[in-house]
Image: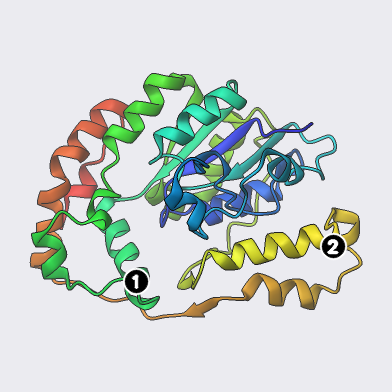
Amino acid sequence: MQLPNFLVIGVAKAGTTSLYYYLKEHPHVHMSWLKEPRFFAYDETNPKHRAADAFPVRSMADYIALFNGVTTEKAVGEASPNYLHSRFAAHAIRTHIPDAKLIAILRNPIDKTISGYNMRVRVGNETHSWENILDGDEDILRSSLYYNHVKYYLDLFGKDRLKILLFDDLEKDAISVMRETYRYLEVDDTFRANVSTRHNTGTIKKARGIQYFRLQYRKSLGMTRAVQSIVPSGIRRRLANIGSSKFEKAEISTDERAGLINYYREDILKLQDLIHQDLGAWLDL
């Protein structure tokens, strides 16, 4: 039975897809074929979870099957950005893989909020204007408050088991960030991933149900690495792109951005003291 020994736990809209693929390139790293299993965040006692299509992997057997292709790789992992925001996930991880190393990549919460809002508008899940959101206590705003979530994981796992990366650093110098990440995972840090490709830029998934469909498709075919070599690559690419569409990024005004900075200011200042990293740029207009 193979379970991962590291997890990328967050956050959404902060480069986790690029991080997943850069990790996957390393010869001593094995990533689950499904980028976002969300398994440890699934609470089968929660009726909302059972009814939702946001959890493509719901049993330990299916989760273990994601790592059937592991051979000699030293680092085995997956990336589910919703773990950081889930205390249920934190305790499930500690129960099942207590020695796992954790990685969280954080983005300027203002930029993350804008990106998340854009996505929700484009898929039809957001009808509020920016004015409505800034005036209210919306989920989209709270999802970019990091301090309590990071502190919870640090208290539960310890500072040596949670690696904090910054999206801005990944954008500016991905080679150095990946070298640092490989070193943390104790694999060859001289390996250079192809960081010229930015993944998931301007692309959105219309439904989490697509992931569930792809999971069932692979299960029905027994989609191991050997079988994947038989299935034409064109078919695999079409499956991977189902439910994706391109969209233009929306912009917000300087005043609206200033309002978001005020909303996140206290959380940012507390977070930078917690992780001992300068986050002052997040407070700039």
Observer-nearest of 171 and 265: 265
**Do the numbered discs 1 and 2 sit on residues whose CB atoms are within 8 Å?**
no
Question: Residue 199's quadrant in the figure?
Answer: bottom right
Q: Which mark is residue 225?
A: none
- SS type, badge 2: helix
Residue type, numbered disc 1: Asn
Q: Residues within 10 Å of mark 1 (few under 14, many from 20)?
A: few
Q: Residue at x 65, y 51 (%)?
A: 193
241 lies above or below 91: below
Q: Residue at x 10, y 50 (%)?
A: 262
Residue bearing the label numbered 2: 221
Q: Which quadrant holds the C terminus? A: bottom left
Q: Position of residue 40 (x, y in %)?
A: 54, 38
Q: Position of residue 279 (x, y in %)?
A: 25, 40
Observer-nearest of 161 and 62: 62
65 lies above or below 258: above
Residue type, numbered disc 2: Leu
Residue bearing the label numbered 1: 125
Earlier in the chain: of badge 1 and badge 2, it is: 1
Q: Give the left or right position of residue 231, taking residue 3 as reference.
A: right
Q: Give the left or right position of residue 235, taking residue 47 as reference.
A: right
Q: Residues within 10 Å of mark 2 (few under 14, many from 20)?
A: few
Q: Residue at x 29, y 71 (%)?
A: 126
Q: Position of residue 31 (x, y in %)?
A: 68, 46
State how far apart marks 1 and 2 are (Cα).
33 Å
Q: Residue at x 48, y 68 (%)?
A: 201
234 lies above or below 150: below
Q: Position of residue 101 (x, y in %)?
A: 56, 28
Residue 105 visible, this orientation: yes
